[in-house]
Amino acid sequence: MKVLLRADVDGVGKRGDIIEVAGGFARNHLLPAGKAIVASPGVDRQAAAMRRARDLRDARDRESSETVARTLVGTTIAVTARASGERLFGSVSAADIVRHVEEQTGAVVDRKDLVLEDPIKTVGVHSVRVELVGGVVFELTVEVTPGG
């Protein structure tokens, strides 16, 4: 069944794409959720308009992500935490890092954009991967010092 996607669907396609999907998937999931409409012969203009809007939104998102990346690349974010020797009493989480980034640079980053497999539990300099919207990826330097 040919459908026009009205929203991005993971693993299927993006808004404005005309795709071929199984009839059951379309009838049971895409159409009732409002994520797609049946592709009729005159739907090409609507699909083109959706793709243009998607491309503009993606370009805006990428531009804002690049601005944030330019602000943060080469910047060291200082975080103080209670420690005993090299070990922290608690840990420094992604939410803590995001708060310190905003306080120190004014740049707004979502905690979900930080790729931090485990919270930081030691004093020292750590590298945290940041993956922003639009495919902008960079490393953020976080220096954890004892104190506070």
Image (cartoon, helix red, strand yellow):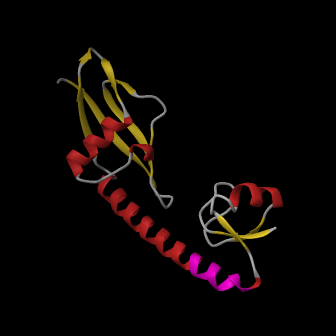
Q: Examine the rendered structure and indicate whether residue 143 appears above or below residue 84.
A: below
* Quarter that holds the N terminus: bottom right
Q: Examine the rendered structure and indicate whether residue 58 appears above or below residue 83.
A: below
How many numbered circles are shown? 0
Q: Nearer the viewer, residue 73 or 49?
A: 49
Q: Nearer the viewer, residue 76 or 1?
A: 1
**Magenta region includes residue 130:** no
Residue at 39 percent across and 38 percent down: it is 127
Report whether 28 appears left or right of 72.
right
Q: Is residue 12 something one can see in this rendering? A: no
The part of the image, by quadrant, that contains residue 9 is bottom right
**Magenta region includes residue 49:** yes
Q: Examine the rendered structure and indicate whether residue 1 appears above or below residue 119.
A: below
* Quarter that holds the C terminus: top left
Overall secondary structure of the magenta stretch?
helix
The part of the image, by quadrant, that contains residue 132 is bottom left
Position of residue 75 measured from the top left corner of the image (x, y, whole percent): 28, 48
Report whether 27 appears left or right of 88.
right
Residue stretch rendered in magenta on the structure: 42-50
Position of residue 88 measured from the top left corner of the image (x, y, whole percent): 31, 19
Q: Is residue 5 something one can see in this rendering? A: yes
Q: Nearer the viewer, residue 98 or 138?
A: 98
Residue at 75 percent across and 80 percent down: it is 40
Residue at 23 percent across and 51 percent down: it is 105
Position of residue 51 measured from the top left corner of the image (x, y, whole percent): 59, 76
View extreme (left): residue: 148
View extreme (front): residue: 32
Position of residue 13 measured from the top left corner of the image (x, y, whole percent): 67, 63
